Image (cartoon, rainbow, N blue to C red):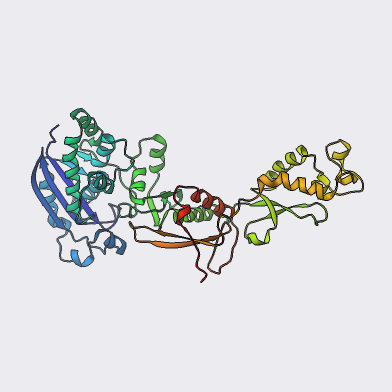
Amino acid sequence: MDYPRLAIVDLETTGGDPKLDRITEVAILVTEGDQLISRWSSLVNPGMPIPPRIQAFTGITDEMVRDAPDFADVARQVAEQCDGAIFVAHNARFDFNFLSNAFARLDRKFEPSVLCTVKFSRALNPEHARHGLDAIIARGGYSVVSRHRAMDDAEIVWRFLQDSRSTHDTERLRLAWARAFSGPTKVARLPQGDVEGLPEGPGVFMLRGASGELIRIGRARSLRPQVLGLFTANDMRSKKQVAKVHAVDAQPCAGDLSAQLLELSLERRLAARSTSAALAWRLDARRAGGVLELIDLNGSDPKEWGEVFGCFRGEREALMVLRPLIARARLCPQRVGLERSGPGPCQAHLLKRCQGVCAGVESTDAHDARLREVLTPLRQRDWPFAGPISIHEESKANGLQTTLEFDGWCRVDEDRARRFDADIMHLLQRWLAQDGNLARCEPASSD
């Protein structure tokens, strides 16, 4: 398959909203078949400050663009480069919308046919999960001098298109091309926010509606491609959800565990609650009125619990679990504390459903030993370490790093206190169960 005339475009910008943000660099490669026809690029003065995070991401600073031409000064060259060619970009919606809005501010139309190489890669190589430019670079073994500079990124797209011709048959290329190509029509907008400027590292994103209402909170192992991917999904449910989105907020994190903890915190803030309920049965043979007591674990130090069993979301669940266990083992509801104490045997003993600790037939020690045995499967999972641990996370993609400390399923806070949180316990247990994570835990410093 011979490629027609293409204008392979890459932009760098001050952010992710084509209506509010501006272009800082544009690069265009004009190609036909396997021939490179022309190569053109220019820095562009955006007429606004470049956010520090974007400067760090692209390497383009305010000083670099201070004496660069405005977009109005390069618009003619951009239009000439794209004239008679198919507009090609990796995540074409982003680059197309920025150029379309830039031309519209000059009262000019920009309506080329469009080919998105993200969609092309997905159709061509559906066996791969990731199709961002970094994933293309890794799979192709390409070397890049200045990633996130317009010309270098455009050249990667050109190399990917060329290599695809030698690694896939013509029919597969034609099908992938058909799925990635759209005629001269507008591509759907991106929402407000630094979407394209997001790093590819882990973090949490928030999708907001027209009045700022929160539509969705989500966690991503790689923020930028994952958030952008939400707006290219083909299933009807995703399309309906993203159609309501007008803004995207995101908070990068140092690692997946940090992102999970942040996601939990944000979800709680949204629901206006601090923690999930965490009730447990505590066994105390010396306690009057029943040896079992239902206690709230949240906010307490596990060292102060004694013998506790279960972690229930409410009293109803705690009773629903306990009552069948007591009945099957013919334990005494009165001794356990499920019935009020009174003189003489309990009702269950009269019905031959209790072995008679309340009637002096069974000793309290024997009864309580059987109770403890019945409750053993509900006992809290032992902390698998000798003491507190630290988990270091660092993301090369966004430069963030942090060290998290845990002890007895509790996150150790700044004042070194241990306060139990059932949600954090479950989160940490799932994280430790994943391959390789247990080995990342180190004994915490005593400082």
* Percent position of residue 414, x then y: 53, 68
Q: Residue at x 76, y 37 (%)?
A: 328
Location of residue 110 (image quadrant): top left
**In screen coordinates, is 12 left or right of 426?**
left
* Percent position of residue 98, x then y: 24, 50
From where the camera sits, is residue 111 visible?
A: no
Location of residue 93 (image quadrant): top left
Q: Nearer the viewer, residue 427 or 11?
A: 427
Q: Nearer the viewer, residue 190 or 176?
A: 176
The quarter of the rendered structure image containing the N terminus is top left
Tell which residue pokes out farthest to the top in this image: 171
From where the camera sits, is residue 160 visible?
A: yes
- In the rendered view, would you say 308 is above or below 93? below
- In the rendered view, would you say 172 is above or below 447? above
* Percent position of residue 262, x then y: 47, 56
Q: Residue at x 66, y 46 (%)?
A: 378
Tell which residue pokes out farthest to the right in this image: 343
**In screen coordinates, is 370 left or right of 304?**
right
Tell which residue pokes out farthest to the bottom in this image: 447
Exactly how many numbered labels are in the figure? Answer: 0
Q: Residue at x 28, y 59 (%)?
A: 57
**In screen coordinates, is 112 left or right of 257?**
left
